[in-house]
Amino acid sequence: PTQGVDMISDSLGEDPAYYECGGGLEKSCEEEDDDGEVNLVTHCAVGRRGEFESRSAPPPPPSKEMTGESKKKDRKGGPSASKTIEREAKASSANDVNTIASLQSFDGHFDASDELLRLMALSREDLEKIVMGLGLSESEGATLLAILFLESKFGSQKAVWELFAGKASAWLSAQKGGTTALSALLEKAKADDAVVVVLSG
């Protein structure tokens, strides 16, 4: 509301547009503001001549409904959309880890199944190049890559895969002659260009 003081004449009360307003006289009319908007303004003569109050009607409250633009923003890039994408990404990661776990053999190794290769976005031809370069069997190569893939892609979910990845490491360690040989193999694999492509894909 805005208030202002004006002088009014003694004949104000004779104007039929004015009527009793508390202790004085009141008149309502429409006035145009600086922005060209028309507002209902109430002029009230309170008490004696010279005390004049102008009260503008309050603006209407903003609509509670989302505008089309707001809805569009929410769908395409607003906070709600971001949270939805984040939840979907976490759910997808959890599903991938569970799928890898389901592909592990009882003794801890992984076979080079089509499903495992799909999850790692690895072709069978590339797997063959890796195992030949590292001097591994196909199962040894698949197990090694599964371990490295879990460490590289799902570090935030280590509590989920740590046990079955440890079982895979124990199996691979037994195949290669102990933990020292396994550590050397892991470092060699991490420096292999073909393996790097898989882990960074």
Image (cartoon, rainbow, N blue to C red):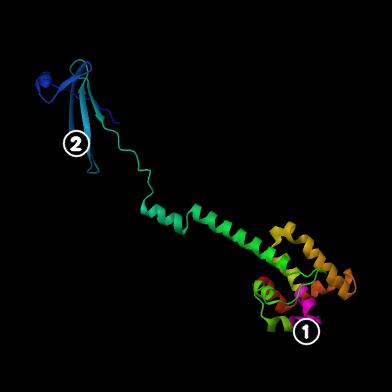
Front-lying residue, 106 or 150: 106
Q: Residue at x 74, y 61 (%)?
A: 161
- Using the rendered image of the protein, determine whether residue 29 is visible from the camera's viewpoint: yes
Mark in front: 1 vs 2: 1
Q: Is residue 173 left or right of residue 105?
A: right
Residue corresponding to mark 2: 31
- Using the rendered image of the protein, determine whether residue 153 is visible from the camera's viewpoint: no
Q: Is residue 158 left or right of residue 169?
A: left
- For the magenta stretch, what is the residue range? 129-143
Q: Secondary structure at mark 2?
A: strand
Mark 1–mark 2 contact, CB under 8 Å?
no
Q: Residue at x 72, y 76 (%)?
A: 195
Residue 39's mark? none
- Would you place residue 19 above or below residue 112 in this image? above
- Give the percent coordinates (x, y) of residue 130: 74, 81
- Residue projecting furthest to the right: 177
Q: Residue at x 61, y 62 (%)?
A: 92
- Looking at the figure, which quarter contains the N terminus? top left
Front-lying residue, 162 or 4: 162
Q: Residue 171 in magenta? A: no
Residue corresponding to mark 1: 132
Q: Residue at x 14, y 23 (%)?
A: 18
Front-lying residue, 77 or 146: 146
Amino acid type at mark 2 = Glu
- Would you place residue 23 above or below residue 187 in this image? above
- Give the percent coordinates (x, y) of residue 162: 77, 60
Magenta highlight: main SS: helix
Q: Secondary structure at mark 1?
A: helix
Q: Is residue 178 left or right of residue 114?
A: right
Closer to the N terminus: mark 1 or mark 2?
A: 2
- Would you place residue 35 above or below residue 10 in this image? below
